[in-house]
Image: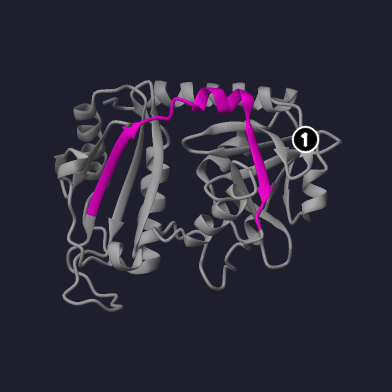
Amino acid sequence: MMRALANINGKILKPEHAQVPFLTGGFLFGDGVYETGCSYQRTFLFLEDHIHRLRKSAGRLGIPVPWSDEFLKHQLQETAQAFGQDDIYFRMIITRGEVTHVGLDIHTDQPTLVILVQELSRELDQLRTRGYHLATSQVRRNPSQAQDPNIKSSNYLNSILALKDVRERGAMDAILLNGEGYVTEGTTFSVFSISPKGILRTPALSVGILDGITRRYILAVAQGICPSEEGAYSLEEFQNAQEVFIASSVRGICPVFQWDEHRYQTPGAITLRLQEAYRKKLDEEVLKSPSRF
């Protein structure tokens, strides 16, 4: 089992002792928001970006965030120090808090703050070289008019259904299309491809995807390596590529060796250059970080 620690409203606990009331909006309805990330050389990467997005998501749901940024950072660092490892996974969750009865409500005076830290998967280094087998899910991404993809909410039913769909067909993870048939993103990651002309492509925000933090930094480090573009791509157009890779805050950049019936070089030459450039960006983050845990 992976080791882990929890911090609930400022109290650090072992997982078996960590409890939240069952009468909370987060447990009853997935009424909460969260951010995930990882540390690198005892530095939490892009933490300012994560906290900013956490506040923005909470604001869209009307969940108050009474804690300062410094308090949130301090609690995360305290939990990481108690955990005692250099490179770890974290999840910061804010839920609407305890309710007086079971039923939909949007009122809360006391939101709940939960911070989880645990070991990073030992498979990550292998996945960054060996890569993923993806399948296109029959489940479509929720339309933005129904659920804003930039509210990073605790309700992940759409992605869970997509993952179940493709796992039953032998794939490792899923890519979802939107209602118009355009490629959007994976269950918990952004997707990129290198076109036959060597152009880095990724779905535009307008197709209904999360404005991913790692996605933004990859597009930035790609400058000088290859041209890039964002757009609305059909499945056939996007899969017609030299290379495909996925990216997220925890995974970094991971190549894809198969997507449906398409196979790709793993890792491809441009993917390798982007992995190197992204790693240099992480090193820069460590050097300029004002504090390490």
Query: In this rendering, is residue 34 above or below 151?
Result: above
Q: Quadrant of the C terminus?
A: top left
The residue wearing badge 1 is: 263
Three-letter residue code for mark 1: Arg
Residues 62 and 139: in front is 139
Residue at x 62%, y 62% (from the top left corner): 139
State yes or no: residue 227 in magenta.
no
Q: Going 51% across and 68% down the picture, which residue do you hit?
A: 147
Residue 207 image offset from top left, x and y in percent? 66, 60
Q: Residue at x 41, y 38 (%)?
A: 37
Where 74 sits versus 165, above or below?
above
- Extreme right residue here? 197
Q: Residues within 10 Å of mark 1 (few under 14, many from 20)?
A: some
Residue range corresponding to the magenta coloring: 113-137
Tell me, yes or no, if residue 202 can be seen here. Answer: yes
The secondary structure type at the circle numbered 1 is strand
Between 185 and 264, the one nearer to me in the picture? 264
What residue sits 73% from the left and 25% below the top?
A: 268
Residue 290 image offset from top left, x and y in percent: 31, 27
